[in-house]
Amino acid sequence: LSDRDGKIWMDGQMVEWRDAKIHVLTHTLHYGCGAFEGVRAYKTEQGSAIFRLQEHTQRLFNSAKILRIPMPFSQEEVNEAQRAVVRENKLESGYLRPLVWLGSEKLGVSPKGTKTHVMVAAWPWGAYLGDDGMAIGIRVKTSSFTRHHVNITMTQAKTVSNYTNSILANMEALDDGYDEALLLDSAGFVSEGSGENVFLVKDGVVYTPDLSAGALNGITRNTIQYICKDLGIELVQKRITRDECYIADEMFFTGTAAEVTPIRELDRVQIGIGRRGPITEKIQSAFFDIVNGRNPKYAHWLALV
Ligand code: PMP
């Protein structure tokens, strides 16, 4: 990913893609104190638009606040940086990665004395869990790794270090022949995927774990709440057990990268009809209408670049 043409926004400047480098003694590289976002731009009739740009930037600033990282740029500047990388790289659609990290002024656990850096990169990225996964659903494994406890790390911050747990769970699932992991919280209740929030459907009602299960407060998750309301589908946030998933009618993952991905199997147990269910399909289709600018009610969620 580092050897390509294009521009990356780094600390207020557009730099050549290949020159967007950091020093090996960068604090965040050693101790993992950093925050990031995953954002998508979509092609709409009006041109490329970033979906829920302000909400992603707000979450980035919230993550930095939780980590006590002072931000050297305003939210407006970071919004504009995101628009600028989409424009500069001439992307019609794609994935954006804003990242906040601490510099190489010193090492030692205390970050005091380090400088905050910010960058935004953007590149084309299709369906995160594959085009087939979008259409027929993916196979998921309950992870042997527990999701973060809310007082071990900060689960409402999208921090760099939180992803070691995600990587372990995802690697285990992939090595075992599955497409993605489902993590349980420290009390054994369903939390989330390695990079996705999770939903299940039972008797026409949609359920998702409440945030006390340590799941990230996903922006796509929030979008699904609006979609369910519009479709007249009840959505309940509650504690969910692993066996409730096995006997669910439908399951799906949501996330900026994963969008709305159906789950057809969990731990070799077929979920519902074993492919994308009808309610998942309705929600998925409403989601793509919104992000692609086909639903005027949500035009304010699309920031033209
Ligand atoms: N949980 C985790 C662990 C994630 O990495 C993501 C992706 N950011 C999500 C949930 C979904 O969040 P969002 O819909 O805001 O992308």
Image (tube, helix red, strand yellow):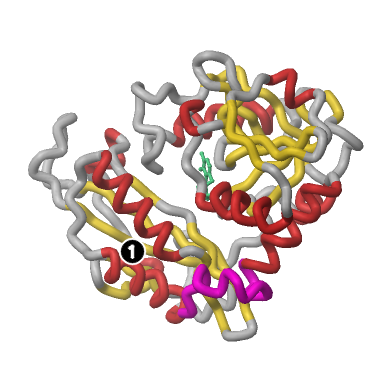
Asked which quadrant contains residue 299, the reply is: bottom right
Place of residue 217 in the rendered image (x, y in percent of width and height, measured from the top left): 47, 42
Place of residue 47 in the rendered image (x, y in percent of width and height, measured from the top left): 57, 83
Q: Find the residue positioned furthest to the right.
A: 273
Q: Specify whether 268 is left or right of 155.
A: right
Q: Specify whether 167 is left or right of 152.
A: right
Between 301 and 269, the one lying in front of the other is 301
Q: Specify whether 3 is left or right of 234.
A: left
User: Which residue is painted at 39% across and 38% down in the image?
Assistant: 156
Place of residue 281 in the rendered image (x, y in percent of width and height, measured from the top left): 80, 53
What is the total number of numbered labels drawn onto the structure image? 1
User: Which residue is painted at 37% across and 35% down in the image?
Assistant: 161
Vertical position of residue 251 compared to residue 245: above or below? below
The residue carrying mark 1 is 20
What's the magenta region?
Answer: 291-305
State the SS at label 1: loop
User: Which residue is painted at 27% across and 70% down in the image?
Assistant: 77
User: Which residue is painted at 30% across and 41% down in the image?
Assistant: 29
Place of residue 287 in the rendered image (x, y in percent of width and height, measured from the top left): 67, 60
Between 122 and 75, the one lying in front of the other is 75
Asked which quadrant contains residue 11, the reply is: bottom left
Kind of residue at disc 1: Ala
Q: How crowded is mark 1: few (under 14 residues within 10 Å), some or many (20 or more)?
A: some
Between 72 and 8, the one lying in front of the other is 72
